[in-house]
Image (tube, rainbow, N blue to C red):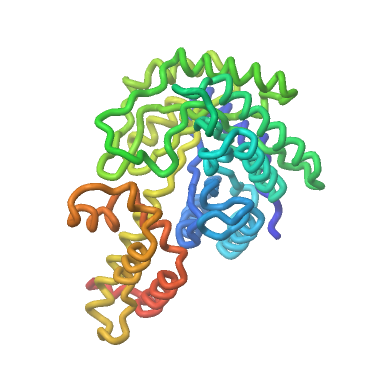
Amino acid sequence: MIKKYMTENILKATIEKNRRGERTGFYSVCSANEIVIRSAIRHAVKNNYPLIIESTSNQVNQFGGYTGIQPGEFVAQVEKIAAEEGMPPMNLFLGGDHLGPLLWQKEPEETAMEKAHGMVRAYTMAGYSKIHLDTSMKLAGDPPGPLAIETCARRGAALAKTVYESFAGLKDKSKRPALVIGSEVPVPGGSQEHEDSVTPTSAEDFLNQVSVFKGEFQKAGIDFSDVIAFVVQPGVEFGDDFIFQYDPQKAKALTGALKNVPGIAFEGHSTDYQSPENLAGMVRDGVAILKVGPALTFALREGLFLLEAIEEILIHESKRSGFKRTLLAEMNSSKQYWEKYYSGTPEEIEYKKLYSYSDRCRYYLPAASVQKSMEKLLRNIPAVPPAL
């Protein structure tokens, strides 16, 4: 096992540099795909910058998630890749994304939060050093209307307590987990329906959320200085067929409010498909952690399809991988990860299954048949001829 990752002090130091006006921040890869992780680590090694690798609660949890991987197993996989690629240990650390009752929204608070506590405990014990606690969703039995910020904060503080109680049981105390919280959290994986616009969180709402969370943390006996970032909506989003790029003018009131909250930066979710200029602008304006996921597997899928086009030129039909065909067959045999997300004519849905910005086909990449065809494709084309 490689030496453990960055401590939270280094993370906090970078946040403070950002707040002082230095254009520095973190790129956070939210993916459990091995090729994506390896590519991200290679890029970070080549350019010598710190990298966050995050697993999301539906990908990796105490029950396995859709990848079938538990937190400790994910840590071992990332460590192995990092060691193989020569990643300096102090340039890599792990984060847990959307940890909370997200997967159990249809259950009452008692059972949903019990499972959420179990997940947070598993992530902490596995050695994750950046924990995003997400309690922004309603649970069965919650009153009608929007979820009360007080309820969201109370549940978040309870999970934070579990984080540090679990951390107290670890032998290695060198990397006390840093927390990311918030109540206005974009939907994981992008919007599930078409949107015509997205409104940034108001400055007043952000400051009120911070105040309420501070109060609940105090009641729970949790040190609020462990919080390094707040999740807000800076006005960026993507979905099935749209992308909203960052507009610094629309977010000016929100980003200006940061000066009233010392020690905290913003964490930007759904920064997939943003332009390089807009990503730099977000870091400049205090969004010091930029999280991306579907755009990375979208790019992977794009690369694999292009490689298969080369395979059709170079390899006899009888020996081809059939990657796209295999991927579609897997998606058609189990529709749970895409059917409710795509609408339109049959032709439009067929297109979206493979080419939507939401990239729902990423859920099928771990399937055994898809992995087998992908490995055959990569064996068939070990190197791309210059003319292609």
Front-lying residue, 340 or 299: 340
Residue at figure coordinates x 39%, y 49% from the top left: 294
Residue 303, quarter of picture? bottom left
Residue 152 place in picture, x, y as percent: 56, 26
Residue at figure coordinates x 61%, y 54% from the top left: 63
Q: Is residue 248 visible?
A: yes
Residue 113 place in picture, x, y as percent: 63, 37
313 relative position to 239: left or right: left
Residue 338 place in picture, x, y as percent: 35, 53
Q: Is residue 51 visible?
A: no
138 relative position to 111: left or right: left
Residue 143 place in picture, x, y as percent: 51, 23
Residue at figure coordinates x 71%, y 19% from the top left: 219
**Residue 117 position (above or below residue 332):** above
Front-lying residue, 350 or 386: 350
Residue at figure coordinates x 42%, y 63% from the top left: 365
345 relative position to 15: left or right: left
**Residue 130 position (above or below residue 1):** above
**Residue 209 position (above or below residue 276):** above
Residue 310, quarter of picture? bottom left
Query: Which quadrant would the N terminus be assigned to in this image?
Result: bottom right
Query: Which quadrant would the C terminus be assigned to in this image?
Result: bottom left
